[in-house]
């Protein structure tokens, strides 16, 4: 069952460039993680400090393994200081009938 995860980030305006550099490095690991089918990142054209990452995962289990890794050994420790607030994460399974 395919899974979509949406990570909504708001950066401090003065830290956008730094945050995007960190995110670029981190997403290389995300894309290489077993079960990741792709990541698309969009930046709000009216608010460059607002960025959304849309991740596609092969299964809920793959997503869960990734989240566990990011919470431990794969933590992105240099990103939190660039954030203007807590990120939000939505994880859902695709509805094939719609």
Image: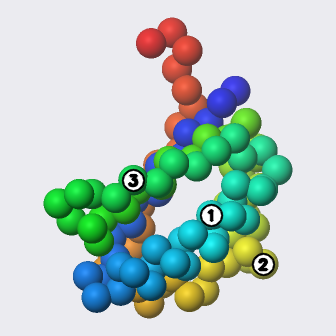
Q: Give the x, y percent position of residue 15.
A: 35, 86
Give the label on residue 42, or none: 3
Label 1: element kind: helix
Classify 10 Å Cα crowding around label 2: few (below 14), some (14-19), many (20 and above).
few
Label 2: element kind: loop
Classify 10 Å Cα crowding around label 3: few (below 14), some (14-19), many (20 and above).
few
Q: Marks 3 and 1, Cα distance to the nearest angstrom?
A: 13 Å
Q: Earlier in the sequence, mark 3 or mark 1?
A: 1
Determine which residue is flagged by label 1: 27
Q: Earlier in the sequence, mark 2 or mark 1?
A: 1
Asked whether residue 71 appears in the rendered view, the answer is no
Instruction: Residue 11: name its quadrant.
Output: bottom left
Q: Give the x, y percent position of residue 9.
A: 39, 66
Asked whether residue 66 appears in the rendered view, the answer is yes
Determine which residue is flagged by label 2: 73
Instruction: Single out the mark in the foreground, 2 or 1.
Output: 1
Name the side, left or right, on which 87 lies relative to 12. right
Instruction: Residue 10: name its quadrant.
Output: bottom left
Q: Give the residue at x 39% y 73%.
A: 86
Q: Is residue 59 above or below residue 36?
A: above
Depth order, front residue of 30/8: 30
Q: Marks 2 and 1, Cα distance to the nearest angstrom?
A: 15 Å
Q: Give the x, y percent position of residue 93.
A: 57, 31
Q: Is residue 28 above or below residue 12?
A: above
């Amino acid at each position: 069952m395919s899974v979509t995860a949406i990570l909504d980030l708001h950066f401090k305006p003065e830290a956008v460039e730094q945050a995007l550099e960190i995110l670029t490095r981190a997403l290389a690991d995300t894309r290489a993680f077993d079960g990741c089918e792709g990541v698309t990142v969009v930046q709000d054209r009216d608010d460059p400090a607002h960025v959304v990452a849309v991740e596609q995962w092969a299964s809920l289990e793959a997503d869960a393994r990734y989240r566990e890794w990011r919470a431990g050994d794969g933590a992105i420790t240099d990103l939190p200081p660039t954030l203007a607030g807590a990120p939000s994460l939505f994880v859902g399974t695709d509805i094939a009938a719609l």
